Amino acid sequence: MITGSRAEYSYYQPIIREITKRSDLDYGIIATCMHPLETFGSTIEEVRKDGFKIHAVVRNNFDGYNHITMAKSLAVLMMQLPELFEQMGADMVLVAGDRGEQFAGAVVGVHMYLPVAHIQAGELSGNIDGTVRHAITRFAHIHFTSNQDAFDRIIKFGEQPERVHLVGAPQVDDLVHGKHTSPETLYKKFDLKKSEPFLLFVFHPVTEEMNRIEQYTKQVMEALQQVGVRAIIIANNSDAGSNLIRKTVQQHIKPFMSIFDNLPREDYAGLMALAGALVGNSSGGILEAPTFELPAVNIGNREKGRLQGKNVINTGYGTAEVVAGIKKALSPEFKKGLKGCVNPYGDGKAAPRIVDVLASVKIDDALLIKQITY
């Protein structure tokens, strides 16, 4: 399995724990992209802390964080992967989500005649991510979907039905089962007050909007300033434009805001359970926040078209629009309406379903030689 960021690592965590329970399965991790970089919080340490087996660390990211460096970084990773898969004696390649590192793994896997299994297949989203996710579908031999909408979309793509499995989103599993830091620890660690609401803020680049990202970030930060509520900011990913977002956020930091390059998964989950709202354009507002009945102010186009729960409030990038969205999210009326909110991305049982399929699938020509149904 390949992991390049904190995001899709959360997909793998419950799956790896499930694999370790079974004597007939083994795994190896290739950690790359943001994981080894201090700029993005050295998240490789979280993998090591979990005690999981890391076969290799690939330092593939070029500095600059623009469209050119983004493409070249993927090329470096793709050159490394064939030998790494061979060293590992890999029988299958497991990829997750919609990032370029996952696409690289899928391309290399199929060219080495290794079956590729894809977690979170079939979902809609904006940005280059949506294109990458659907490109992986064309390469993958096994598709794991998080909901019926995604399942139906893959069938419409012409994929053979026996390859598609409706399992849920594995990153929801730990949230459902309460694997997160206690409120008492978090209030002390982040200097929070029980009587005052706080916001979680995560704002990533939209690669096709790179020439406008500084202005958009400025407008959104001005909205946070106007609302004036305590905000915990989690720094953005490494996509093209990431350095511009970081610079602009730093320029607009106020005393009631705190910024972190990364947070441990358990802390992030615990903060979602306590926060007044999640603000930005992270998939966390779509995929994970519903589990906590947490309002999510989803800004702009990054998650455009994605299946959403009733916790999501969509806004544009304008300061006034974002302010209005945050105020609505924090209102007692909106929060009251989220009681019993259903997460459309799963029930907390995705990992065992996924591992059951991985353990039982027969690797033969019927699996490796795909046929389009139309």
Image (tube, grey):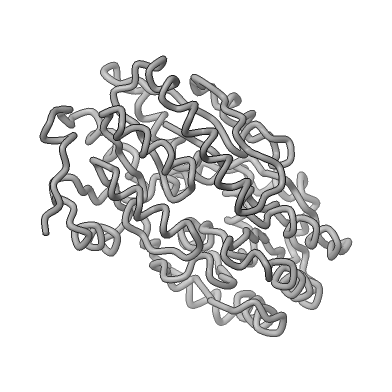
Identified at 74% across, 58% down, the residue is: 244
Expressed as whole percent of the image width and height from the top left, the position of residue 36 reads 65, 31
Query: Vertical placement of 153 versus 106: above or below?
Result: below
Q: Is residue 211 left or right of 79 when viewed as pictured?
A: right
**Residue 155, picture quadrant:** bottom left
Expressed as whole percent of the image width and height from the top left, the position of residue 158 reads 17, 57
Expressed as whole percent of the image width and height from the top left, the position of residue 2 reads 46, 33
Q: Is residue 41 left or right of 134 when viewed as pictured?
A: right
Query: Vertical placement of 246 versus 56: above or below?
Result: below
Q: Nearer the viewer, residue 274 or 105?
A: 105
Identified at 70% across, 84% down, the residue is: 320
The N terminus lies in which quarter of the figure?
A: top left
**Residue 275, picture quadrant:** bottom right
Q: Is residue 151 left or right of 273 when viewed as pictured?
A: left
Identified at 47% across, 56% down, the residue is: 129
The C terminus lies in which quarter of the figure?
A: bottom left
Q: How many marks?
A: 0
Query: Vertical placement of 268 versus 112: above or below?
Result: below
Specify the farthest residue to the right: 255
Q: Nearer the viewer, residue 365 or 249?
A: 365
Q: Nearer the viewer, residue 266 or 201?
A: 201
Expressed as whole percent of the image width and height from the top left, the position of residue 253 reads 84, 62
